[in-house]
Amino acid sequence: MAIACTQSERNQMTTTKLLGLALLAVCAMGAMASSAMAAPTLEIANANANVMGEQKSGTNDVITVDGTSTTCENITYNALGSTPNGATNLVLHPEFGGCTVFGFLMSSVSTTNCNYRGMANGTQTEMTYSGGELEIICGANPITINAGTGVCVATIGSQTISSGIDFRNTTANQNSDNFMDFDLVMTNAPVAVTKNVDGFGCPFSGTGNTTASHNGQATITCNNVANGTRADCTVNG
């Protein structure tokens, strides 16, 4: 038997449906916004990992202060404990070696009390997260660049670098095994520097605070904590 509705009842039902659809739309938009704001995570296949890195083959890291470049040929990034699958940031200890100034003057870079914390909270374009952040975290002493046995000395203290930092997923062929790794890429990343010593022959334009640029690239790899085997690790948004 058909049930007849009055015009008033039909209007009420229509209004209820429209309100319901509007509520669903608001919920959907909220879910999309929440998803868009979620920070990218480090995805590690089947395991927590010791995450490490090294300077990418064929590249050098270059830190330029007042037009003078310190070039380093050997940089490693050492894990600080286990990194869980799904982590939103990564903490590593950098160590610099084989550094020179002007192409011939030996330079040391001390990072004893300092670590890097990277966050890929930028915009994804294909395999790259552009606009990430790199936080330098130092304890009692800053990163110290000492060139020519004290002729030029500059220090880099705790700070957050929020431009010039990219994280790029990449397939690396290492030890005849293909694993998904990712690169930490610094392109003209602005670094706050204090020039402590401007001695004879040092090209600094005096002492004091300035901004340096850091260019470099490192490949980050993951190793299973349980057995030390390689594990795929990617930045995933």
Image: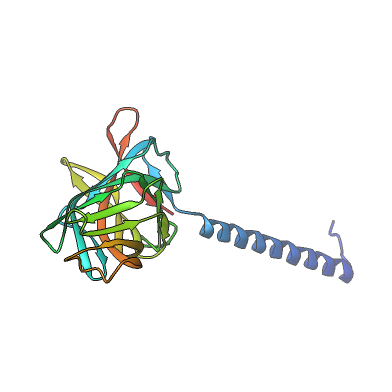
Tell me: residue 162, above or below residue 81: below
How is the protein colored in the picture? rainbow
Whole-percent x, y for residue 55 in the image? 22, 51
Tell me: residue 26, above or below residue 41: below
Residue 83 visible: yes
Residue 126 visible: no
Question: For residue 169, which quarter of the picture?
Answer: bottom left
Q: Is residue 92 left or right of residue 75?
A: right
Whole-percent x, y for residue 52 in the image? 29, 42
Between 126 and 28, the residue placed more toward the observer is 126
- Which residue is farthest left? 104
Residue drawn at x 26%, y 44% is: 179
Whole-percent x, y for residue 219 in the image? 26, 50
Count the marks: how many? 0
- Which residue is farthest front? 200
Whole-percent x, y for residue 114 in the image? 36, 47
Residue drawn at x 34%, y 62% is: 193
Q: Is residue 123 left or right of residue 64?
A: right
Q: Is residue 229 left or right of residue 72?
A: right
- Which residue is farthest top? 227
Question: For residue 154, which quarter of the picture?
Answer: bottom left
The quarter of the picture where the N terminus appears is bottom right
The quarter of the picture where the C terminus appears is bottom left
